[in-house]
Amino acid sequence: LDKVSGNGVKDISFEVKKGEILGLGGLVGAGRTELAQLIFGSERMTSGSITYNGKELHLKDCQQAIEEGIAMIPEDRKRHGVILEMSIKENTTMPCLKRISKKGVLSVAKEDEVTEKYKKELLIKTPSINQYVKNLSGGNQQKVVLAKWLAMNPEVIIFDEPTRGIDIGTKTEIQKLVLKLADEGKSLIFISSEIEEMLRTCNRMAVLRDGQKVGEIDEADMNQMNVMKAIAGGEQ
């Protein structure tokens, strides 16, 4: 990102390497979600540029971001992450329908195969992949959100409060998944209001306050005191 502005944020620059987890730190309202929406194309930039794999992106919407290999796990899973009245299978395969269709005809076998793969990998507790998402626990609903985006095999994944409101066991599973994705060479942006979670998960952290970047903390300097100082005073 180079001097990205829009959607309530101003002049934000940073880079995320392959295999790296960059945390976006800050208080609620600091502009973290707003920045994530710009990167995902769901909101429009007013200035600045986003370059990915040496190519400048001009994202008109999130569909274009998806086609470029960018995914976002949204903060509000019930409003933006899943469609509760649809099945696990329908939700999981929604972003990758083109890939599992031939000449416009959806392959039910491939749809089942993809969903079963992520049901197993993410340990989604359900009697059937045809179960409605509304009947799952909060933690399992969040796993369906993850399955939905992982099924499209993105290269850049934004996690916006992925463990909020879920049980400690599922929280740990999601943190392990994030680390595994980084090991596989994905570029990850991680947002959490829990500083301890950020310290356990991230390689570096960019700190936002009032819609602007006020600090960047390297792994060697990432500790609770430095993060709190950056959040409160704009200094490391």
Image (cartoon, rainbow, N blue to C red):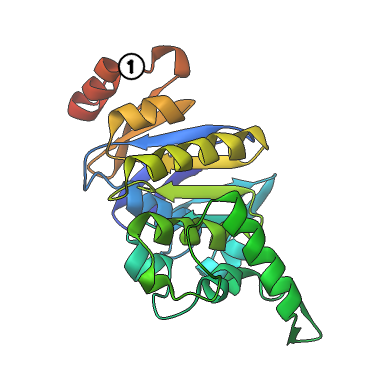
Rendered image quadrant of residue 94: bottom right
Q: Which residue is mark 1?
A: 223
| Spot occupied by residue 72 in the image (x, y as percentages of width and height) | 48, 56
Residue positioned 22% across, 20% down in the render: 229
205 with respect to 87 (left or right) = left
Quadrant where the C terminus sits is top left
Q: In this rendering, does residue 201 appear at all? A: yes
Rendered view: 145 above or below 36: below
184 with respect to 72 (left or right) = right
Q: Nearer the viewer, residue 31 or 132?
A: 132
Rendered image quadrant of residue 102: bottom right
Rendered view: 84 above or below 120: below
| Spot occupied by residue 57 in the image (x, y as percentages of width and height) | 60, 56
Residue positioned 74% across, 72% down in the render: 110
Q: Residue furthest front?
A: 127
Q: Nearer the viewer, residue 56 or 138?
A: 138
Q: In this rendering, does residue 69 appear at all? A: no
Residue positioned 43% across, 40% down in the render: 190
Which amino acid is tagged 1?
Asn
Mark 1 nearby-residue class (10 Å; few <14, some 14–19, many ≥20): some
- Mark 1: secondary structure: loop
Rendered view: 132 above or below 184: below
Residue positioned 71% across, 75% down in the render: 98
| Spot occupied by residue 73 in the image (x, y as percentages of width and height) | 45, 55
